[in-house]
Image: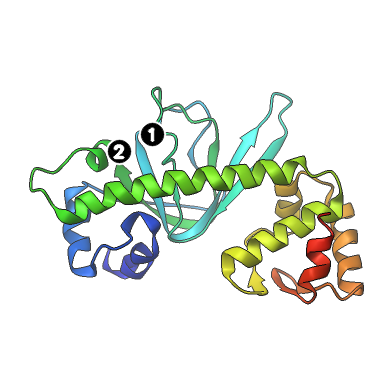
Amino acid sequence: MFQHTDVLLKCALFKNINEKDLGHLLKCLDTYTKSYKSGEYVFFAGNEVNYIGVILSGSAEIIKENLAGSVHIMAFLDPSHIFAEGIVCTRERISPVTIRVKEDATILFIPYGRITKSCGNSCDFHNQLVQNMMMILGEKNYVLNTKIELLTLKGMREKIASFLLNESKAHNSLTFNIIPNRNEMADYLNVSRTSMCRELAKLKEEKIIDYYQNSFKILDEDALIASLS
């Protein structure tokens, strides 16, 4: 676990917890790790989930399948990202989504009951963990609202502009790398890949953005914001 210390300290669940306390906390929480190959599934929609996962290495994606069998990518998970925190807080703990590994990954699992119940030692860092959990749930609700807003946009340029502006804000920079490839980005935006790539090329020709593979740079932020009106 020591090789993943830096990743864990970046995880929102362990915010304000000292590195010297981390090892003891992980033992207190009865955590364990598991490795997955690309394309493997952590769990499926309909499964009961009683743990929270933290991506230590590699990447994964949250997907949802409709009744027609079409798969839609809801979110991407990089190292230090967590998942299932909203599921375990429900009464039935039945997942509405599927977690699929995108790149070979190692995942830390934390039994939910170990987070909500005190270890008996009145650890200050355990109390901090509960506070962090509440903050994460609030922020996840904000992210879901952003996703809903994105899906309600009708125009291709609007969707792309909203996505890139949100990514820029998340990275706190006008230059950033995105996780999804073009196919995955189209799935995430729920649009045609061909039409999306055509619109990206137009934005590049108009010198509003520049990009190379998964690296993007917003050249004219005002123009991109204007695309949303």
192 over 10 or under it: above or below: above
**Amino acid at the residue labelled 2:** Tyr
**Amino acid at the residue labelled 1:** Val
Residue 201 vs residue 51: left or right?
Answer: right
Q: From where the camera sits, is residue 152 visible? A: yes
Mark 2 residue element:
helix
Residue nearest the viewer, comparing 1 with 29: 29
Identity of the residue drawn at 24% across and 68% down: 19
Mark 1 residue element:
loop
Task: Answer with mark 1 or mark 2, whichever residue precedes in sequence.
Answer: 1
51 over 54 or under it: above or below: above
Percent position of residue 141, x then y: 52, 42
Q: Work out how far the residue at label 1 is from the one at label 2, CA to CA, in angstroms.
A: 7 Å
Percent position of residue 210, x then y: 79, 75
CB under 8 Å between discs 1 and 2:
yes
Colouring scheme, one of rainbow, by chain, secondary structure, one colour: rainbow
Image quadrant occupied by the C terminus: bottom right
Name the residue that disc number 1 marks: 88
Identity of the residue drawn at 35% across and 39% down: 51
Name the residue that disc number 2 marks: 112
